Amino acid sequence: MIYPVTSRGNSRVKLAVSLKKSSHCRKRNRYLMEGPRFIGDHLARGGSVDFIAIKENLTARSLAVAKLADSRDIPVIQVSDHIYKDISSTDTPQGITAVCPVPEYSLGDLFAGKTVLALDGVADPGNAGTAIRSAAAFGCSGVVFLKGSAYPWNPKVTRSSAGLNSAIPVVEAESLTLLKKEHPEYSFLGASSTGSPASEVFSITKKPVCVVVGSEARGLSEVTRMELTGLVSIPMASAVESLNAGVSGSILLYLLWKNQEPARE
């Protein structure tokens, strides 16, 4: 059953509106996922949803996802377009938003023998979301957000990751020091223009790899550099000085994934 809600004072409406801010996501351990495709995929994966908010005059696709949620006993509330604009974090709302619990994983869930991606001060939500999406595409066991990076379940990160921040393990960590201490079986390779060509390094690396990517503005922090096993670079045309963090991480993960292709077969 879809429940009509007419008041902005409704507890579910107030919760959904508050989750547009990362600070409230942290406090309530909840986050927003918007759009019928992302929510539909999340439900298909068996993802957890507290409730769904929809606006009036839905598209057929959004209505189908809302009905799917209702069939699984997930509460669905319908609000006016005006109230829904308060809930949505996009300029062009698609009319359906899910409030979901933040997935809980430990570093041990990530460092289990497969490739791990670590983001070092990647504060731009678009780059962070792109990195998560690529990590899922290229077989990573998870993504670590180091100090100074965006909040992994910020609405913009969720959109940029296509909702995949709920599909693979994502955790936050203070620094690379703890990761390296607890997982000496890994090589920690940082992205840098001064590094050795990534393809060459990946072809001879015997250990599982944690790829570490810094911010576009500052690169890898000095604290992180001190903990790295080595540096890897992406050969580029001389006219191009650097790539953004999302693209850099994606290319490195692809190169590593291709290098491991025989092992996957």
Image (tube, rainbow, N blue to C red):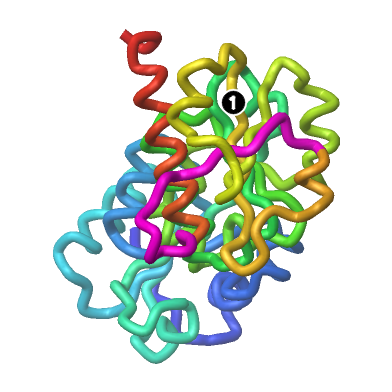
Q: Which residue is mark 1?
A: 209
* Coordinates of residue 29 in the picture (x, y in percent): 69, 55
Asked if residue 197 can be seen in this view, the reply is yes
Question: As drawn, which residue projects farthest toward the left?
Answer: 60
Instruction: Mark 1: give few (<14), some (14-19) or many (20+) Cα within 10 Å.
Output: many
Q: Quadrant of residue 112?
A: top right
Q: Depth check: 262 or 138 in front?
A: 262
* Coordinates of residue 220 in the picture (x, y in percent): 69, 53
Residue in the image at 42% along x and 54% along y: 247
Q: Depth check: 157 or 247 in front?
A: 247
Assign a secondary structure to mark 1.
Answer: strand
Q: Quadrant of residue 251?
A: top left
Question: As drawn, which residue projects farthest toward the bottom?
Answer: 82
Magenta stretch contains residue 124: no
**Where are the magenta residues, as a range?**
227-243
* Coordinates of residue 107 in the picture (x, y in percent): 72, 31
Q: Quadrant of the C terminus?
A: top left
Identify which amino acid the numbered label 1 is placed on.
Val
Q: Quadrant of residue 13?
A: bottom right
